[in-house]
């Protein structure tokens, strides 16, 4: 049975571990220097960092379970536009990850629909996200939801830049 619910601080360890695993599954082959990847995880997927983000009122997390085991999560950042300035009409889908073994079950679709519904409920006018330009599976998924490419942004893992495309959707 699939359960999707809002995440709490008690889920920080699950999210940190899921973040590391799912990022490796989706992006790990693109990162040349594995030490940089480990440093990235130790910064962005440390349990303490995830707890801090979970306690930030401008972040909303969801976690997905299958038979009580965590299999995915998502993070919505409130009041952030594509220029990283405060804009109360924009929100950012910062993360949406499902373990590879569960992708074929359309759980990402369910999670995406929950996030879009919540953004609309909160009266956001636009939602945006970034995706690595070589992540064709992710890009195809977002385009299915009418996200349109509007630019690109630098994303560094260590000292290496991995160009990310910016996608935006009017709600």
Image: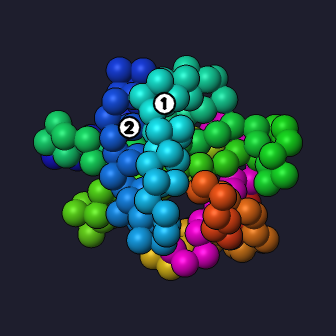
Q: Is residue 167 above or below residue 86?
A: below
Crowd rating for badge 1 (residues with CA inside 10 Å; few <14, some 14–19, many 20+): many
Residue 144 seen in this snapshot: no
**Along the viewing direction, whichever of 4 and 171 lies nearer the viewer:** 4
The x, y position of residue 71, in whole percent, is 27, 48
Asked if residue 74 lies in the magenta stretch, the reply is: no
- Residue at the spot 84% in from the left edge and 52% down from the top edge: 83
Asked if residue 131 lies in the magenta stretch, the reply is: yes
Q: Are marks 2 and 1 in contact (CB under 8 Å)?
A: yes
Residue 142 seen in this snapshot: yes
Crowd rating for badge 2 (residues with CA inside 10 Å; few <14, some 14–19, many 20+): many
- Residue at the spot 38% in from the left edge and 37% down from the top edge: 15
Q: Is residue 86 above or below residue 158?
A: above
Res. 27 image quadrant: bottom left
In the displayed structure image, the side of residue 168 where residue 49 appears, left or right: left
In the displayed structure image, the side of residue 4 where residue 43 appears, left or right: right
- Residue at the spot 53% in from the left edge and 40% down from the top edge: 44
Q: Earlier in the sequence, mark 2 or mark 1?
A: 2
Q: Give residue 15's mark.
A: 2
| Residue labelled with disc 1 | 50
Q: Is residue 36 above or below residue 57?
A: below
In the displayed structure image, the side of residue 122 where residue 153 appears, left or right: right
Q: Give residue 40's mark.
A: none
Residue range (magenta): 121-135
Element at badge 1?
helix
Task: Report the quarter where the C terminus lies.
Answer: bottom right
Res. 80 image quadrant: top right
Element at badge 2?
helix
- Residue at the spot 42% in from the left edge and 64% down from the top edge: 28
The x, y position of residue 49, in whole percent, is 52, 29
């Amino acid at each position: 049975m699939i359960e999707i619910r809002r995440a709490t601080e008690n889920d920080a360890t699950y999210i940190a571990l899921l973040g590391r695993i799912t990022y490796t599954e989706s992006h790990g082959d693109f990162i040349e220097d594995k030490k940089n990847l480990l440093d990235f995880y130790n910064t962005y997927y440390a349990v303490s960092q995830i707890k801090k983000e979970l306690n930030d009122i401008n972040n909303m997390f969801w976690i997905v379970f299958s038979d009580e085991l965590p299999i995915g999560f998502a993070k919505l950042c409130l009041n952030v536009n594509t220029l990283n300035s405060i804009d109360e009409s924009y929100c950012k889908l910062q993360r949406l990850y499902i373990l590879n073994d569960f992708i074929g079950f359309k759980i990402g679709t369910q999670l995406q629909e929950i996030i879009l519904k919540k953004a609309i409920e909160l009266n956001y006018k636009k939602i945006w996200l970034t995706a690595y330009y070589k992540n064709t599976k992710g890009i195809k998924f977002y385009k299915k939801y009418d996200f349109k490419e509007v630019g690109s942004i630098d994303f560094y893992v260590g000292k290496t830049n991995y160009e990310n495309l910016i996608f935006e959707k009017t709600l």
